[in-house]
Amino acid sequence: MASIKDITSVNFDKEVLESDLPVLIDFWAPWCGPCRMVSPVVENLADENLGKINVGKINVDENQSLAMQYGIRSIPTLSFFKGGSEVKRVVGAQGKAQLQKVIDEVTG
């Protein structure tokens, strides 16, 4: 199983902005039903794209400053970072095929 990192304001710069690989960040909360639906999809994609993209999760309840900094208004929000900048954002629960397409676009 791929390692999905818990991202916080403490390790955000190192794990996301300074990453050599593109990074998919799942902004979520434990009480969010759609977040729980998309979580296994994100885990599966992390496994299938190992070495191509890093994957992390940010609990918006515990990391409100990061959520505010990136203007997260709705969860789940999947943000794609490349070269230290957000390059793509997907809001709401999406299927595996749609998310794989975005991963291919960001990593291609």
Image: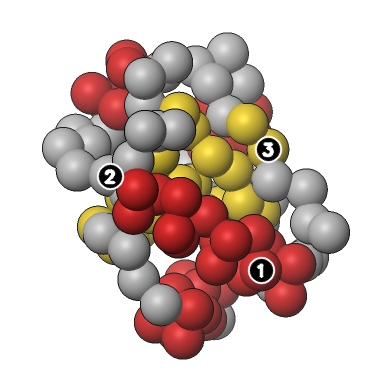
Q: CA distance from mark 2 to mark 3?
A: 18 Å
Report the disc number at residue 58.
Answer: none
Of residues 7 and 35, the one drawn nearer to the viewer in this rendering: 35
Residue 5, labelled with which disc? 3
Residue drawn 41% across and 77% down? 95
Image quarter of residue 6: top right
Q: Amino acid at mark 1?
A: Asn
Tag 1 residue: 44
Which residue bears the numbered disc 2? Answer: 75
Which of the image's four quarters has the C terminus? bottom right
Task: From the viewer's side, name the closer residue of 42 and 24.
Answer: 42
Q: Secondary structure at mark 1?
A: helix
Residue at 45 percent across and 60 percent down: it is: 38
Does the image show residue 73?
Answer: yes
Kindly identify the amino acid type of the residue bearing the numbered disc 2.
Ile
Query: Badge 2: how crowded within 10 Å, few (<14), some, or many (20+)?
Result: some
- Give how far across and how far down residue 13 sits, in percent: 55, 26
Element on which disc 2 rests: loop
Which of pointers 2 and 1 lies earlier in the amino acid sequence? 1
Residue 82: x and y, percent?
A: 49, 55
Q: Is residue 105 left or right of residue 13?
A: left
